[in-house]
Image (cartoon, rainbow, N blue to C red):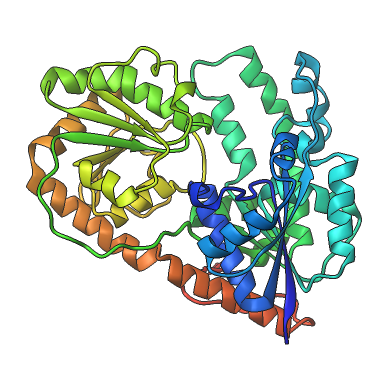
Amino acid sequence: MTRAGLIITPFAPLIPNRSVTGVFKRLRIFSSAVHRSCGQVRLLGIVPEQEVAAHPDLRPVQEALAAEWGFPVEVALCPSRQRGQTAWNHYGPGTLSIGEQPEFYHYAGRPQVEAVRRELAAGPDLVFAHRLSAMIPVLRSGLRPANLFFDLDDLEHKVRLRSSLLPPLSPGKLARLAHLPALVLAEARAVALSRAAFVCSEADRRDLARLVPSLRERIRVVPNAVDIPSLREGPLPAPTVLFLGDLRYAPNRTGAERLIRKIWPRVMARRPDARLIIAGPWPEGLASFAAAPVGVEFTGFVEDLPALYRRARIVACPLDTGGGTRIKLIEAAAYCRPIVSTTIGAENLGLNDGEDLLLRDTDEAFAEGVDMLLGDPGFGERLARSAHGKVARTYSRECVEDGLATLFTHALSHPGSAQPPRPAQAISVPQE
């Protein structure tokens, strides 16, 4: 029997072959699992009005998405809510309502809620809300789907707290802390409404379970995952360091700027022949882009990832904020490249300092780590192969997708069950 699955997301992949950053990779895993359990998939994207206007005919989008993902997806769009930014609406109303906070305002208006209500009223057999932004109109719709699954991915309150306390402190950053109670309440309500809620690491599961202890059995870990390429021997690349990330994402911009301005001069002082590649969409958003620093190449979006990794001897991830797990490091390990990262950049991945990668938190120590790996390829290869083995066992897309499809299929077949059963190994449930 063919069932209907509905996906609600603020990240509709309208240009599928370019929608390949971490958030889209994770969406694809869940979408594939929905397709395997339901057969029919409809995706409602709540996206900026200009993106809706740019796609008056969605048939080409659907055809491209089917070619990229390997199964048909019916796409519908709803324009997100817009408002002029003022100091008051940036800080004030969000203390009482998550729907007024800058990150979530766009998805909480009447048109967005009505669009979701119409989709839910059609009676899909399974509903998947992708990120908290997509869950807000579900919460406001007044409808309670029986088979609602929710991917929180990153704990939004944890990301907010970390970014607000990241030096240098400012009155504006500290004022955003007043939004935390409304944010935590929305996360708790979303978990309560869901048959199962997903986060990407065991640490996040524990943190969320402390907030909603009565609902801990609903919280499951679905790790970020990638396709694992086969290992291929090749010539040693030139002494090139790679930073790869979507530069529209603030933590990536901050990390890239830190690497270029503070760490890279220290590396160049040791190794004048070294080169740095900054890869990812919107490099022009970096203050360093216009300065054209010596030894730094900005590639923009890169379609051929294997070719990019063949150019890189090591991968750098000097991130100071953000949350969840870094799919960029999972991917680097999958391509068997040695990694230098901050502790925050590699948190929750299960990769160990000196065994699978180098963890260095100060600018000087990070530069020394880069210099060490550039100067000792044998040591770097041992780290890379160890990380590759762990990633292949834990973060394989095929394995994670299989576990999700099993969970969804069982939920659809057992509507009276309070919770889906313990799923495949790639998806964990509480053990305490």
Compared to 153, does 289 lie above or below? above
Q: Is residue 352 visible?
A: no
Q: Residue at coordinates 64% horizontally, 13% vertically from top-left? A: 171
Quadrant occupied by the C terminus: bottom right
Q: Is residue 254 visible?
A: yes
Compared to 316, does 17 lie above or below? below
Quadrant occupied by the N terminus: bottom right
In the rendered image, which quarter is residue 423 located in? bottom right
Q: Residue at coordinates 26% horizontally, 63% vertically from top-left? A: 389
What percent of the width, then of the height, locates residue 367? 22, 27
In this picture, residue 405 sits left or right of residue 277: right
Residue closest to the far bottom: 1
In this picture, residue 374 sits left or right of residue 416: left
What percent of the width, then of the height, locates residue 283? 44, 27
Of the pair 430 and 113, the residue shown nearer to us: 113
Q: Residue at coordinates 46% horizontally, 22% vertically from top-left? A: 284
What percent of the width, then of the height, locates residue 95? 79, 29
Compared to 401, does 225 lie above or below? above
In this picture, residue 403 sits left or right of residue 351: right
Q: Residue at coordinates 39% horizontally, 46% vertically from top-left? A: 303
Of the pair 228 and 372, the residue shown nearer to us: 228
Marks counted in the figure total 0
Compared to 362, does 227 lie above or below? below
Of the pair 49 and 371, the residue shown nearer to us: 49
What percent of the width, then of the height, locates residue 341? 31, 38
